[in-house]
Image (cartoon, rainbow, N blue to C red):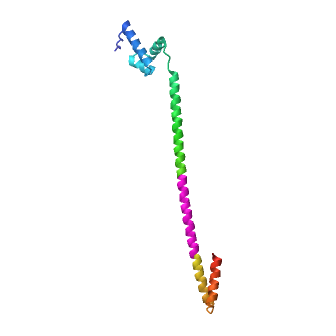
Amino acid sequence: MVAARKKKLTKAEREKREKAIIADLKAGKLSYRAIAKKHGVSLPTVNAKARKAGIRRRKAAKVATRKVAARARKVAAKATRRKMARRKVARKATTRAAKKVTRKAVRRAAAARTTRSMEKFQEQFRALLLNYYPNMSLRTFEKISKMIAKAIK
């Protein structure tokens, strides 16, 4: 099978198509490739029509768009870094607070244990004194107990 030949356009139809291509080029909303596809012509044809009409490709606009996009990415990255830093600080503050609470609790527990152990020691020492010196006077016993309590604290 042989492919069907394309229909030749008249001069008026070509001029009409050329004007439509130039109008799309001046509007600047479509890319050169999209314009070529829309009008059923090749990319070099669109380039030739643009050159003929004195329209330059908008490379500067593309560069500016890239710069804006790059700047937006930088700003977004900076914001993300800030968020991460805030989270890190919050995590550290929470950890510090937890450690402080833990340290306080440990100190309290240690103090309570120390107090209990001192009381236990005093009781055992009194029992020992009374065991070995049953004839000790109450006054002497109290005096020795106070000395031991003072020495322990």
In the image, farthest residue toward the front: 139
Residue 129 falls in image quadrant? bottom right
**Residue at screen point 58% across, 76% down:** 117
Is residue 151 shown above or below 3?
A: below
Residue 90 position in % (x across, y down)? 53, 51
The N terminus, quarter of image = top left
Question: Is 103 contained in the magenta span?
Answer: yes
Residue 44 drawn above or below residue 103: above
Residue that sits furthest to the bottom in the current view: 135
**Residue 148 as seen in the image, left or right of residue 7:** right
The magenta-colored residue range is 91-116
Residue 9 in sight = no
Q: Quadrant of residue 22?
A: top left
Residue 34 location (% of width, % of height)? 42, 21
Residue 15, how many percent across, how many down?
Answer: 39, 9
Residue at the top extreme of this rendering: 11
